[in-house]
Amino acid sequence: MADFKINGKNVVTQSGIAEPVLASNVTFPAGHVIQVVSITKLDQMSFNTSGGWVTVTGMNTTLPAIQTGSKILVSGVVHFGCILDSNPTGRIRDSIDGLVQLPSGSGQLLGHFGSSYINDGTATYQMFPAPFNFMYTPTTTASRTMSVEVRQGDTHNQTCWINRSVTDATDAWISRGMSTITVTEIAG
């Protein structure tokens, strides 16, 4: 099949019996999804106050170079397991733009998501989903890696978990979870 052209510019190319390929010079309308990358963490990880901000192992994903004018949509969920006197909070770090879209504050633990302060001694068997969803305009079109960082903000130094409750056993009434980060390029 021959190439499909408009005004002398390739729109679609095809060689032999291969699938047609959209030309790289095609511009998508605003709001169109250009590309999506995602990673899901299935294992567990602990963290506490003494560690400060900790990068979550297995929860980073790389978005290839993007088009000029595109925006980046970051979404996902982290499942926290914590107990009395804990404040699990998370944030997303862009390897180029750093921490973007953080809330303003003075003295508070600032993050993109969290389960809020847990003051319940019976939470030992619970997991708390902490979803996040935000969009921003990157400073450059270069490829970037997005990673998840977490912190237990309370000074009591309780250990928190990702993808499991504090009490973890092989009983059917104790559940485990998974955590995901999805990064989407949206045409600007």
Image (cartoon, rainbow, N blue to C red):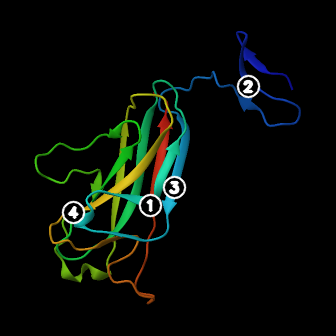
Residue 1 image-quadrant placement: top right
> Which of the numbered marks, if any, corresponds to residue 39?
3
Residue 109 lies, in percent from the top left, at 18, 54
| Residue occupying the point 36% across, 36% down | 97
* Among the two numbered marks 4 and 3 on one chain, the one whose residue lies closer to the N terminus: 3
- The mark closer to the camera, 1 or 3, is 1
Q: Is residue 91 left or right of residue 118?
A: right
Above or below residue 36? Residue 5 is above
Between the residue at mark 4 and the residue at mark 3, the CA separation in whole angstroms equals 25 Å
Q: CA distance from mark 1 to mark 4?
A: 22 Å
Q: Which residue is under mark 1? A: 57
Image coordinates for residue 122, horizontal then vertical, percent: 23, 83
Q: Amino acid at mark 3?
A: Ile
Residues under numbered marks 1 and 4 in contact, where contact means CB atoms less than 8 Å apart? no
Q: Nearer the viewer, mark 4 or mark 2?
A: 4
Mark 4–mark 3 CB contact (< 8 Å): no
Q: Which element is circle 2 on? A: strand
Whichever of labels 1 and 2 marks the residue nearer the N terminus, that label is 2
Element type where label 1 sits in the image: strand
For mark 1, does the 10 Å Cα neighbourhood hold few (<14), some (14 to 19), or many (20 or more) residues? Answer: few
> Which is nearer the N-term, disc 4 or disc 2?
2
Q: Earlier in the sequence, mark 2 or mark 3?
A: 2
Q: Which mark is residue 116?
A: 4
Q: In the rendered structure, which amino acid carries the disc numbered 1?
A: Thr
Residue 12 tag number: 2
Image: 87 above or below 168: above
Tell me, yes or no, whether the two marked residues, 1 and 3, touch with CB atoms within 8 Å: no
Of tags 1 and 4, which is closer to the observer?
1
For residue 93, above or below residue 29? below
Give how far apart the Cα atoms at labels 2 and 3 are: 30 Å
Q: Residue at x 43, y 76 (%)?
A: 176
Which amino acid type is marked by label 4?
Ser
